[in-house]
Amino acid sequence: MKRLTLPELFVLLLSAACVSILLLAAACTDSTQPLEPDGLNPYFDVAVGTITQITMDPADQQQPAISGDRIVWEDFRNGDWDIYMYDLATGTETQITTDPASQYGPAISGDRIVWVDRRNGNRDIYMYDLTSGTESQITTDPAEQELPKISGDRIVWIEGPGRDLNMFDLATGTQTTVAADPESHFLVHNDISGDRIVWAQKDDVPDNYEIRMYDLATGTETQIITDPIYDHTNSAISGNRIVWLRSGFTPYVIYMLDLATGTQTPVASRYTPADNLDFSGDRIVWEDNGYGDIFVLDLATGTETQIAEPGNQDHPAIFGDRIVWEDDRNGNGDIYMFEPGVVQPPSLQDLSDLVDQYEAAGSITNHGTAESLHAFIRQIGSDLGTGDLDAACARFDHFISAVANKSGKQIEAVVAQTLIDLAQALKDEYGCSS
Ligand SMILES: [Ca+2]
Ligand SMILES: [Ca+2]
Ligand SMILES: [Ca+2]
Ligand SMILES: [Ca+2]
């Protein structure tokens, strides 16, 4: 029998049990933002989330990135590309660059924003520090630097013409070459999390993109996957896990490698083209160019969800529970955000309410049956009140057996299953052993 996942159950119980509260921070601090998400909402559910339009300007806003409360993007409202930021904690939008040349391709980690800047006639990496309010030029040479990513003190980028992967460490003030590409082929999709940098590169043999990783702690480069048939691109890293996309031929497959266990797993298979993966905590997001929507895969629950909205949605980025993307539903590029609603975990009262609702709806046909279920629930409440978890868990099992025995008789089968699923979810929540 199929057990409803907790999010499914919550949707079911929406009217009875859900409280929708936006995840708004109470106060603004300009101090340290988290570099990695924490406090993930375990009851993440796209169905009870909120979608917010972040930019209203009629020009194009695109390529968003997010860290903590800050969303950054490239913006054409001044007739040239600039970097803008929206702070969710303060509700304020800030223009980060004013130079008439192009600033684009931003990334953000905590208080630091990096981007590609053409003000010197070639591409350079620049940084703005929100704490100090200062802008710095990270690279000064005439080579072309692009695709900056940042994690804490480390900024990585790809540098032409050799397409080398370089890094600047803000803590030591030193620049190093992480990976020199001897074949001068493409390095793309570089990402960094803590000590680890991942990227995709294309070599002569085999003539396909493969995934590589460099560990700054050990100074070692590892080939994560190579494949003579398929391309492997869209590498992204969050903590100990790397995800990437197998493409070239259908199905598109998203893989995950857990560096802690060494286990590599295909986590999603798609027949519509996926691109622009991003990864944070347990969640992978990507754009689907068949549907023109954003998809989210929750690795903790195995649930894949389509954020289906009018128009095309591209370039998603995720930090914790928040997903941002560029959206053309208004006829120009805008930045939108998804935030999950906060739903309360189920309670014993929900189970009692459900019995009442089903009896009122005629799905429990016998008042005595409903009363016997209420008696179990009261006893469970009493056991929990006196701290006797073993007794409460045993009574949950009695409740489940009683409902199962009456399924298809005094209780409609589908309703019986819902009651059993909720009782099982409550057992899990209270920590019963099985
Ligand atoms: Ca500009
Ligand atoms: Ca340069
Ligand atoms: Ca769409
Ligand atoms: Ca716009």
Image (tube, rainbow, N blue to C red):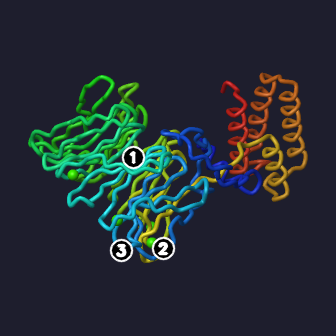
Q: Which of the pair 296/174 is nearer the observer? A: 174
Q: Report the amino acid beneath label 2.
A: Asp
Of pointers 2 and 3, the one earlier in the residue sequence: 2
Q: Nearer the viewer, mark 2 or mark 3?
A: 3
Q: Which residue is mark 3?
A: 79
Q: Which residue is mark 1?
A: 268
Pointers 2 and 1 in contact (CB under 8 A)?
no
Q: Which residue is mark 2?
A: 57
Q: Which of the pair 182/26 is nearer the observer? A: 26
Residue 290 location, x and y as percent?
36, 64
Label 1: few (<14), some or many (≥20) within 10 Å? some
In space, the residues marked 2 and 1 are separated at their CA atoms by 36 Å
Residue 383 showing in the rendered view? yes
Label 3: few (<14), some or many (≥20) within 10 Å? few
In space, the residues marked 2 and 3 are separated at their CA atoms by 12 Å
Pointers 2 and 3 in contact (CB under 8 A)?
no
Vertical side of 434 occupied by 424: above or below: below
Q: Quadrant of the C terminus?
A: top right
Residue 255 location, x and y as percent?
35, 41
Vertical side of 7 occupied by 72: above or below: below
Number of numbered discs on residues: 3
Q: Report the amino acid beneath label 3.
A: Gly
